[in-house]
Amino acid sequence: MSEEYTTVEQRVSYGIGRQMGDQLSQNSFEGVDVDAVAAGVKAALLGQPSTVEEPLMRAAFEEIQKRMELQQAAQAAQGAAEGEAFLEDNAERAEVTVTASGLQYEVLATGAGDKPTASSTVRTHYHGTLIDGTVFDSSVERGEPAEFPVNGVIAGWTEALQEMSIGSKWRLYVPYQLAYGERGAGGAIGPYTALIFEVELLEIVG
């Protein structure tokens, strides 16, 4: 670590700048001009007038917003197409059942217990991935089952759980319409994303 910044004030100032940079790198557009960012921060801290007129700055923000929206729409369309193609091929497999809603499932183990209703609360183990195998959530990896109401999860889960007996384990192939839809969920699950879950119904707790 460089000792260029030796005082507490310098190190705190650097830390503030670092945090701002980390945030910008995660949320900003491609091609951000580092020197221009630094100049803008410096001018604001020193109380200097802006060197870019407000209408020009506003127009630039609007233009970048349009570009980002177009890029996101293109990525979403690609993801939707990939998910639909995957599900179409997957539906041809003999071990896969397709329901009227479009949910696909594969029975890995059949239990002999009761089936929950929409108003039940259940305890499950699950392992969730994207269609490329990327893990986005897993109670199995955490080593701790999850408990939730059947009608409080994504539609694909709500449908499947009511057909599973206690002790059953299914692999679900969930189209985006029965998952997180057009909005996605956080950074891991984009818009229009098909999902795969292995779900084991451990217990009906209420």
Image: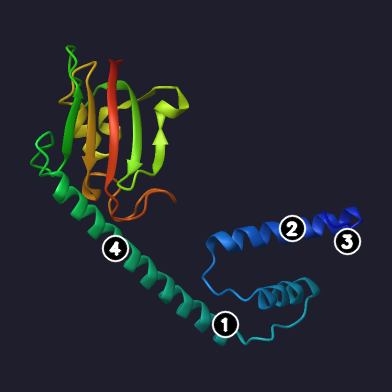
Residue depth check, mark 4 versus mark 1: number of the one nearer the observer: 4
The residue beneath circle 2 is 16
Q: Which amino acid does label 1 sit on?
A: Met
How far is the residue under mark 4 from the one under mark 2? 37 Å
Q: Residue 57 carries which label?
A: 1
Q: Earlier in the sequence, mark 3 or mark 1?
A: 3
Name the element at disc 1.
helix
Looking at the image, do the residues carrying marks 1 and 2 touch, with CB atoms under 8 Å apart?
no
Q: Position of residue 187 (x, y in %)?
A: 44, 51
How far is the residue under mark 1 from the one under mark 2? 24 Å
Q: Earlier in the sequence, mark 4 or mark 2?
A: 2
Q: Earlier in the sequence, mark 4 or mark 3?
A: 3
The residue beneath circle 4 is 78
Q: Which of marks 4 and 1 is nearer the N terminus?
A: 1
Q: What residue type is labelled 2?
A: Ile
Residue depth check, mark 4 versus mark 2: number of the one nearer the observer: 4
Q: Which amino acid does label 4 sit on?
A: Gln
How far is the residue under mark 3 from the one under mark 1? 34 Å
Tell me if mark 4 has few (under 14), some (14-19) or many (20+) residues whose alpha carbon lies within 10 angstroms of its own: some
The residue beneath circle 3 is 4
Tell me if mark 2 has few (under 14), some (14-19) or many (20+) residues whose alpha carbon lies within 10 angstroms of its own: few
Question: Which quarter of the rendering shows the C terminus?
Answer: top left
How far is the residue under mark 4 from the one under mark 3? 47 Å
Tell me if mark 1 has few (under 14), some (14-19) or many (20+) residues whose alpha carbon lies within 10 angstroms of its own: few
Q: Which of 108 and 9 is in front in this view?
A: 108
At a point 69% along the width and 86% down the height, the residue shown is 51
